[in-house]
Image (spheres, rainbow, N blue to C red):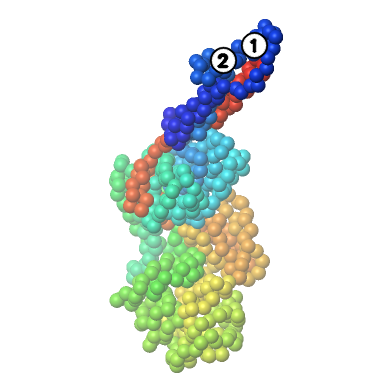
Amino acid sequence: MSFAYPGALILFLPLAGVVVALYLLRMRRRELRVPATFLWPAQTEEVRANALFQRLKPSWLLFLQLLALALAVFCLARPQTRQRGLAGEVTVFVLDSSASMGATDVLPSRFAEAKRLAREAILSARAGDRMALVEAGPVPRVVFPLGNDPARQIAALDALEGTDADADVGEAMRLATAVVSGQDGARVVLLSDGDFAPIQNFSQGKAAVVYQNVGKGGTNLGIEALGVTDTPKGRLLFAGLRNYGGQPWETTLTLYADGKAVDSLKLKVAAHSTQGHTVAAPPGARLYEARIDPKDVLKADDYAAVSADPAASLRVLKVGGEDPFLERALALDPRVTLDRAATLPPDGGAGYDIVAFDGVPSQPTKSRGVLILGKAGPDAPVRVDGAAKRPKFSGSETAPLMKGVDLDGVYIDEIERVSPKGSAEALARSSAGPLVVADRTPIRRTVYLAFAPLQSDFPLQVGFPIFVANALDFLGGTAGGGPLVVAAGKPFSVPVAQGEPTLIDPDGTKTTLKPAGGAATIREARRVGKYELEVDGKRRTVIATLQTPRESNIAPVTQIALRDQPVRSLAAPLRFGDFWRPLATLCLLVLGFEWWLYAKRS
């Protein structure tokens, strides 16, 4: 046992001295002559007992009062006992819902085991304990805020489901510390297998961080890569398998083209190694798939798919400073793989489909599409004639690039005065000249915006992500109506002309989506499998796959890094439990008994 405020124990001595002194004080009385004293024997005894500085006689009242005083002082010192448990007085649980948590080495799964630990902590919480839960998924969120309502907390926890996606555990931890910001004695408990990137830019503040590891084994075989390429000898399909375990693994790999099997063979993959297989693929197929049947503990990486539509995958290089609005708009397109650079690489971006110059002068590139935002270079499809301040929107053309984009009312601080060159066409105009210019040549397509987005409030308008999506369609080519392959759990958007789209998951559950600004953002494809998306009366297949090899390496991590500081897994961390409440109850009982005894003697 220990005390939170041990200095309070010193109060017992002076307070006890005051109680004893009260029994030594002489009472003042008026002198009164009486004919005899035998009528008042008790009063005579009391006079003798209250004589000043006389020896105290044993008294139950004095003993009970000193006992009650001792109990009260102990309560003020707050005695505490050490206990084991995940929860404290103020606790935020961070529950990892990534793909690796779906491993079944802990039955029924790691995610179910983490939920069980959180449930036990909620049910064992004391009356004054407060708890919150943060889901560490593709987009971290607060499942329930700080509170002490076990019934609602258990219901919210039971409704939580795992994903087949990569989790942003770092952002979830930062969100958890924000929930308990500034609160003394707070605790952030991470329930995870540790299979995530090191967490940087993290400050725990006053909160203590506890890591509870979930998982036992690391044996797993998964599809690490699947790709298709056209060569002079025809189209080739490549699949790569990775064995993350310490023993050789034998499996059957089956490759499909548009749902038909084109090859099936048995492969033996050595421990901790990768083995690939290449096969000639039908040239006219639009979707290629791969399956393995290893019967391992993780199913999310036993299936992969890739689209053969050249416009179904776009590599985009953003050149310039940080622009979260543009990066977010680009990331919402499921076709985009985004890279960032401060300057254009020496090869001119030869490996990219689209190069976007954001607020920096454009340069000659080797990509098939160029997006210029704010500053035209010598190779731009416009001629710069100066600059203009705060222009007014005057109108736009009816073109696919401007569909759903309304620049009327957009505040623009400054634009370049330009005039189109050659075959370039102005699609939107202002009082100072063209705002949007598009150019199409046999070699390259270019879209020019006369102002940098961060020099306006355009990024805050609903038309901005629509404009970026339209620009990607114009520069990279609109993908056909074939299957759309996306990363599981990654949000993406689709244009919507009318009505409300619906998404049917592999289990047949239908979800109605709410479009905003001519587009609908889809976050519900959190599991690997085939979905059906109904938009504008047309149905399209959406295939969600696990595209993060790190999630396939399911070996539990016993020590994680928080801002380069190691945090080891603790099965049951210590906490201090207050013991003053039963002492306070006992103190009240003693005082009650003392009052009863005094009343009886009186």
Q: Is residue 578 visible?
A: no
Task: Identify which amino acid the numbered label 2 is placed on.
Answer: Ala
Seen in the picture, residue 472 relative to 500 is either above or below; the reply is below
For marks 1 and 2 on the same chain, the one whose residue lies earlier in the sequence? 1
Which one is in front, 69 or 137?
Answer: 69
Element on which disc 1 rests: helix
Label at residue 305: none
List the residue tagged with mark 2.
49
Which one is in front, 81 or 211?
Answer: 81
Picture coordinates of residue 261, whole percent (x, y) = 45, 54
Locate residue 191: give its quadrant: top left
The residues tagged by marks 1 and 2 sit, at their Cα atoms, a distance apart of 11 Å
Badge count: 2
Locate residue 376: give its quadrant: bottom left
Q: Residue at x 33, y 47 (%)?
A: 566
Element on which disc 2 rests: helix
Task: Identify which amino acid the numbered label 1 is placed on.
Answer: Ala
Q: Residue at x 63, y 17 (%)?
A: 597
Disc 2 residue crowd, few under 14, some 14–19, many 20+, Cα 10 Å: some
Q: Residue at x 34, y 76 (%)?
A: 344
Q: Is residue 151 left or right of residue 467?
A: right
Seen in the picture, residue 85 relative to 557 is either above or below; the reply is above
Q: Quadrant of the C terminus?
A: top right
Q: Is residue 533 visible?
A: yes
Q: Are marks 1 and 2 in contact (CB under 8 Å)?
A: no
Seen in the picture, residue 307 relative to 99 is either above or below; the reply is below
List the residue tagged with mark 1.
42
Disc 1 residue crowd, few under 14, some 14–19, many 20+, Cα 10 Å: few
Picture coordinates of residue 162, whole percent (x, y) = 51, 47
Which one is in front, 430 or 124?
Answer: 124
